[in-house]
Image (spheres, helix red, strand yellow):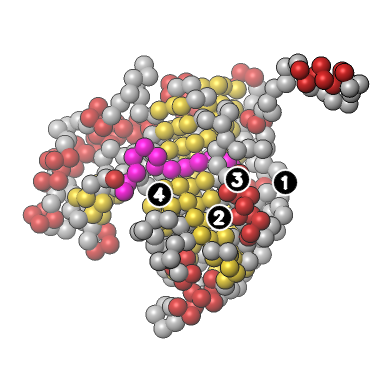
């Protein structure tokens, strides 16, 4: 009102227009802009923009969210998340913890005693405690796995919408948008021991924060993904291995295709993003086309991303490496075709340029415009020089050139923009 009074006094009415009941833009109706990465290919990605009024929901708890998702139906729908929703709750909204899911006599103490490698050996766990673990895990999955169907938009309202404890799973669905949402702590109560993994054995967890499996035309934008609440670094060690509780932050597997991930923040996690889940999954050839732009990878140990088979355009992203256990950022795996340009890396003194790239059966990596602690570097040249004699060289010819993208800024300009604008609650 004061602003309008000043405008009247100055004779600016008609020039300065301040509606008395101005409302924020409805981002639930937004669609992916043309040429914004692989998800804009062909029919583009519109999510639930075509939803009628009966299929626009504002949800505040798990029960409302489950009803709105409608079992992963293909009906066009817009789901607005308000406040914080905890997936580990019962139908009355009461909090559930791991003990509420445990059944069949399962206990971690008994499980560790049953499958201690010193007595059990290297065989896959079987028997009563493993059966009880599986039954307990199934009970948790009923609560935390949330299927997302085709023609769906999920958005957070305002700048503080949170979904915690959930695994959003887009499986064999098309045309999905997930935006403006802080998704955290997809915590697995019942990891399984795998004796032979890595030679020493390891703990395997069940839930990616977002999992795309056989999904097409997906836009993930301005989301924040993390383990906030239960970082794996604070978990104990069992059988000399960290008792992991989280899997990937965003995994894109099983022939998923035409995906754009933009202006998002991946933070405080081990394995951030896997694109393509197996060296023998040759059916993924020609799929796994993904664009990653203007994202921040912060305190991520590895897989930012790791790629098999896919044509991945990686531009204008920001990497802030802080973890003492850091392994690599760009994983070049079987038949991957990563086209990386104008990305900025920040790292402490113990991390070298050669550490940024790791190859498993990969053969090619295009890179240009890379900054490392503010200085231009050639990732490919340094990788090949550092690994000469121990691994085969990577070529810069990945066999394709990206055409679907917006303006590509310098790494320095993108670095500043991403630091200010990536993550939930920051849509302009």
**Label 4 neighbourhood size at 10 Å, few (<14), some (14-19), many (20+)?**
many
Left or right of residue 215: residue 416 = right
Helix, strand or loop for disc 2:
strand
For this view, does 162 lie left or right of residue 290? Answer: left
Residue that appears at 55% across and 38% down:
424
**Category of crowding for the residue at label 1, using alpha-carbon neighbours closer than 10 angstroms: few (below 14), some (14–19), many (at least 20):** some
Residue located beneath label 2 in the image: 318
Q: In the rendering, at what x and y percent does residue 30 appear? A: 67, 34
90 up-or-down from 98: above or below: above
Gap in angstroms between the C-alphas marked 2 and 3 = 11 Å
> Pointer 4: what residue?
269
Of circles 1 and 3, the one toward us is 3
Name the residue at 29% across, 45% down.
Answer: 234
Per the image, the residue denoted by label 1 is: 34
Q: CA distance from mark 4 to mark 1?
A: 32 Å
User: Looking at the image, is 147 positioned above or below residue 259?
Assistant: above
Give the residue number, with chain letter if any, for mark 3.
420
Q: Position of residue 271 (x, y in %)?
A: 40, 53
């Amino acid at each position: 009102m004061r602003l309008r009074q000043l405008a009247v006094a100055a004779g600016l009415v008609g020039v300065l227009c301040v509606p008395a009941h101005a409302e924020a833009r409805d981002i639930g109706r937004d669609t992916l802009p043309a040429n914004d990465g692989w998800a804009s290919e062909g029919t583009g990605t519109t999510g639930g923009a075509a939803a009628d009024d009966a299929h626009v929901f504002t949800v505040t708890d798990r029960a409302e969210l489950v009803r709105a998702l409608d079992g992963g139906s293909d009906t066009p729908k817009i789901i607005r998340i308000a406040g914080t929703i905890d997936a580990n709750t019962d139908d009355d909204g009461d909090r559930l913890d791991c003990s509420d899911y445990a059944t069949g006599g399962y206990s971690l103490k008994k499980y560790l005693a049953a499958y201690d490698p010193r007595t059990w050996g290297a065989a896959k766990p079987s028997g009563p405690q493993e059966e009880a673990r599986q039954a307990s895990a199934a009970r948790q999955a009923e609560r935390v796995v949330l299927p997302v169907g085709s023609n769906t938009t999920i958005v957070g309202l305002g700048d503080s919408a949170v979904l915690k404890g959930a695994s959003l799973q887009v499986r064999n669905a098309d045309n999905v948008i997930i935006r403006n949402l802080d998704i955290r702590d997809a915590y697995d109560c019942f990891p399984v021991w795998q004796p032979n993994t890595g030679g020493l054995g390891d703990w395997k967890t069940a839930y990616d924060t977002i999992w795309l499996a056989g999904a097409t035309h997906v836009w993930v934008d301005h989301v924040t993904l993390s383990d906030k609440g239960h970082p794996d670094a604070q978990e104990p060690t069992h059988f000399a291995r960290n008792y992991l509780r989280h899997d990937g932050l965003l995994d894109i597997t099983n022939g998923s295709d035409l995906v754009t991930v933009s202006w998002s923040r991946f933070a405080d996690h081990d394995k951030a993003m896997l694109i393509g889940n197996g060296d023998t999954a040759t059916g993924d050839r020609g799929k796994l086309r993904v664009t990653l732009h203007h994202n921040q990878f912060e305190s991520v140990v590895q897989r930012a991303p790791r790629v098999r088979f896919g044509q991945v355009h990686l531009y204008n992203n920001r990497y802030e490496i802080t973890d003492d256990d850091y392994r690599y950022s760009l994983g070049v795996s079987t038949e991957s075709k990563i086209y990386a340009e104008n990305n900025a890396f920040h790292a402490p003194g113990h991390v070298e340029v050669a550490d940024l790239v790791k190859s498993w059966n990969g053969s090619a990596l295009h890179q240009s415009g890379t900054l490392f602690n503010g200085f231009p570097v050639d990732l490919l040249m340094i990788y090949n020089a550092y690994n000469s004699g121990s691994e085969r060289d990577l070529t810069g010819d990945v066999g394709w050139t990206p055409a679907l993208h917006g303006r590509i800024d310098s790494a320095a300009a993108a670095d500043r923009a991403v630091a200010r604008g990536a993550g939930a609650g920051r849509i302009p």
